[in-house]
Image: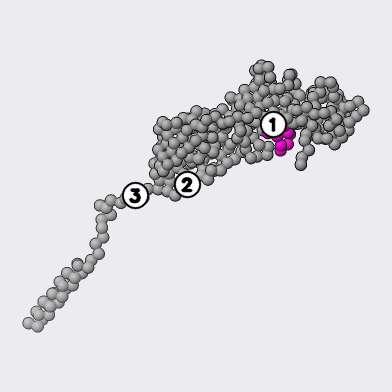
Amino acid sequence: MKKTLAILSLSSMMTTGAAYAATTETVVPDMHTMQIQPVKTQLDVTVQVNGAATEKGYLKSGAVEPMIPLRAVTESLGFTLTWNPETYSVDISKGNVFTTVKRGEDRYTVNKMFTELGTAPELVDSKLYVPASFVDKILHGSVVTDGTSVSVSSKAEAKKVQTTGVITSINTSGKYTSIHIQDAGMGGLVLNIGPDTTFKMLDGTKLSLADLNVGLTISAEHSLAMTLSLPPQTSATAITVLDKTLHKDALGTEGVIEAVREDGSLLVKGKGLTENAQNEIVLQLGADTAIVDGNGDPVEKSALVKGAKVIGFYSPVMTKSLPPISNAWKIVVEAEQE
């Protein structure tokens, strides 16, 4: 009897314990039946160009500005794009605006100068995206950002100014073409030439870039905007040659007048500015030799003294003497640096 009671008591205790354990058991939810809300890391951005909707951009969480589709925006603004698959870069051009954009590099070229925007271009689904400020700071357009909406438009044509100067070099190598005027060093102004730049004589005769040569005095119509480089650079829209005649194949030498000879010729020592130009040359002056400053304004012949800094432009026909002798058609008297 006692054994039977003991067994019943033990059985009751086990049942009670099981019931207690069941009431305190932690219930683990079924992860397969739960709806997990994803955390958005970026938002869609609507983009309009000149009032018309284009492809969407995106705004990353914590980003300073939205990213916009490069091709859709620039082509809508009239730019031409050339994709370089080897370097994952794009060349963009319109008129006198040239720039290159490369995936992953916060270095945007503007007139051959590098500009940083704080955000590198990104390649997403085979499309290149750039920060919205690219329109304003690189393309000189107008952009307004309002939350997840970006409105892009073309700015009115930039104000133009006229600058006169003597051509000291013409650069046609590489991707960009430019003309340096007024100075042969860090001074003067570099005019970036684009496919829409026009060339003509003062009488209206049309020219091409190939017709120009060093030593010509020109009047350049160009943008008021310039780079902060030395020398500064700007985009030229029109070039007018002020000289009555062109001097094809003219040579140029920048240097110091080492001697003024009895016959009035000048011994100039320095460096040649063009191919086949001499570092040391004797320049004979004639009645038609123009003596000007870097802007092309006349200078008195008395300024041609020993020690004066000049740029001599002369004929490619030279004597075989040392130093060679040639006829000068223009002498630029450089201003003294303060």
Residue at numbered disc 1: 180
**Is the C-beta separation of discs 3 and 2 under 8 Å?**
no
Circle nearer the N terminus (3, 1): 3
Residue type highlighted by circle 2: Val
Look at the image and tell me in which quarter the C terminus lies. Answer: top right
* SS of the residue under disc 2: loop
Residue at numbered disc 2: 64
Residue at numbered disc 3: 38
- Dot label at residue 219: none
Circle nearer the N terminus (3, 2): 3
Residue 185 colored magenta?
A: yes
Q: Give the residue furthest to the right.
A: 262
Residue type highlighted by circle 1: His
Q: How crowded is mark 2: few (under 14 residues within 10 Å), some or many (20 or more)?
A: few
Residue drawn at (72%, 32%) of the image: 182
* SS of the residue under disc 1: strand
